[in-house]
Image (spheres, helix red, strand yellow):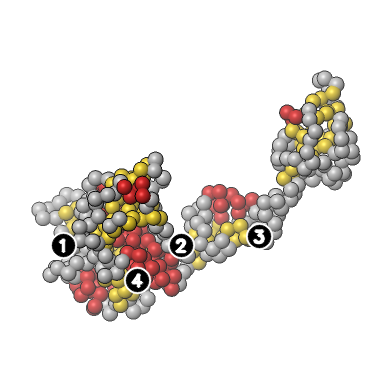
Amino acid sequence: MTTWHEARDIAAALGRDAPTRVLTVPLARAAGLTLAGDVRCERPLPRFDNSAMDGWAVAGDGPWQVGEPVLAGSIPPSIPLEPGQARPIATGAPVPPGTLTVLRSEDAICEPEGDGSVIDALGTPDPGCDIRREGEEAATGDTLLTRGAVLSPPGIGLLAAAGVTEVDVSAPPLVTFVAIGDELGAPELDPGHVTDSLTPMMPSLLAALGARCATTARALDRPGDVATAIRRARTETIVTSGGTAHGPADPLRAALDRLEARVLIDGVDLRPGGSVLLARLPDGRHVLSLPGNPLAAVIALLTVGWPLLQARIGRDVPAATPCTAGLHAGLAGIAAADGRERAVACVLEDGILTPVPHQRSGMLRGIAAATHLAMIRGSHGELLRLPWACV
């Protein structure tokens, strides 16, 4: 049976082969989006030599005769300072030519007392101190951010400072979600029905994985009904839940046969979440079919859907980090008895990894409180940080 590592690689390869839609958006609207190409500096950063502190721009040895101040936002001075001259300068103001150093306000004394016409240093100033040199952060043409980078707030600030006003980004993959099952009902349940918990969470869950849920749909446990719902989808990726087992009422495989889909993954050696399928339709679209049990569905989406969607927008496959001996000690005794890999929702706090309660395949209470997913086989463990966990 396919391991979750193999399934992750298959999904990522499928995502990388799919065409990516590129959008050009204003920089201010690009937060959280993925760069579709490298972004280069369009002007030196900083644009000119400027002061990093409030103080005096001085030339030569002190004491210095004080001239007119240089303020932030003023035109860069063209007349050089001569030795023995100083000009008060504000943070960010252009440094006059000939400046030896910027002497901080707290490092200078005024002479005579109360008269700011002459200053001297409390110590020996080092040349070039507190001067931000033109281009010292980035020169014109330098690569500031690379393709696949997610635009963070500081990243947006960096690009704005470098003169970038718009960027090319990978459009989030559009997903149609189809919940399959005769038993699914509204919150006011009829006898024998269960509440559909996956449809309400799917838009935010997919957004955490870099995609956008364009629409949701329902399908009964009939191969024809499921095939129709998939056929009607107008998105690059269709995610379904339910009907993935081999029971007499499970319609998914028969529906995929009707659609002439090529199944790339049919089950993963993992509990819960192992009854997951990944298929490609003849028109190139993807169908990711999750188990119907809520926790199993979330784990299957994280292990197979996350790398698929990340690869679609040029991001790296989410990394799993090996558990240290200390971390793994907290998971002792919970490996699956049948030797299969087990996914365990955990909380990682202060270097201590603790499994959460309430994580049977039909439950969500445990993973709602978790920060990590531990993938455990025997004495070996790896950690995936949950994409919505702020740790």
Q: Nearer the viewer, residue 10 or 29?
A: 10
Q: Nearer the viewer, residue 217 or 160?
A: 160
Mark 4 and mark 2: span between their CA atoms?
A: 19 Å
Between discs 1 and 4, the one toward the N terminus: 1
- Rendered position, 91 above or below 317: above
The answer to whether 152 appears left or right of 101 in the picture is left
Question: What residue is shown with label 2?
Answer: 316
Q: Quadrant of residue 11?
A: bottom left
Mark 3 or 4: in front is: 3
Mark 2 and mark 3: span between their CA atoms?
A: 23 Å
The answer to whether marks 4 and 2 mark residues whose Cβ atoms lie closer than 8 Å is: no
The answer to whether marks 3 and 4 mark residues whose Cβ atoms lie closer than 8 Å is: no
- Rendered position, 140 above or below 284: above
Between discs 4 and 2, the one toward the N terminus: 4
The residue under label 3 is which amino acid type? Asp
Question: What residue is shown with label 3?
Answer: 142
For disc 2, the neighbor class at 10 Å (few under 14, some 14 to 19, many from 20) is few
Q: Position of residue 368 (x, y in %)?
A: 30, 47
- Rendered position, 201 above or below 316: above
Between discs 3 and 4, the one toward the N terminus: 3
For disc 4, the neighbor class at 10 Å (few under 14, some 14 to 19, many from 20) is many
Q: At numbered mark 1, what does the secondary structure look like: helix, strand or loop?
A: loop
Q: Position of residue 106 (x, y in %)?
A: 73, 28
Question: What residue is shown with label 4?
Answer: 286
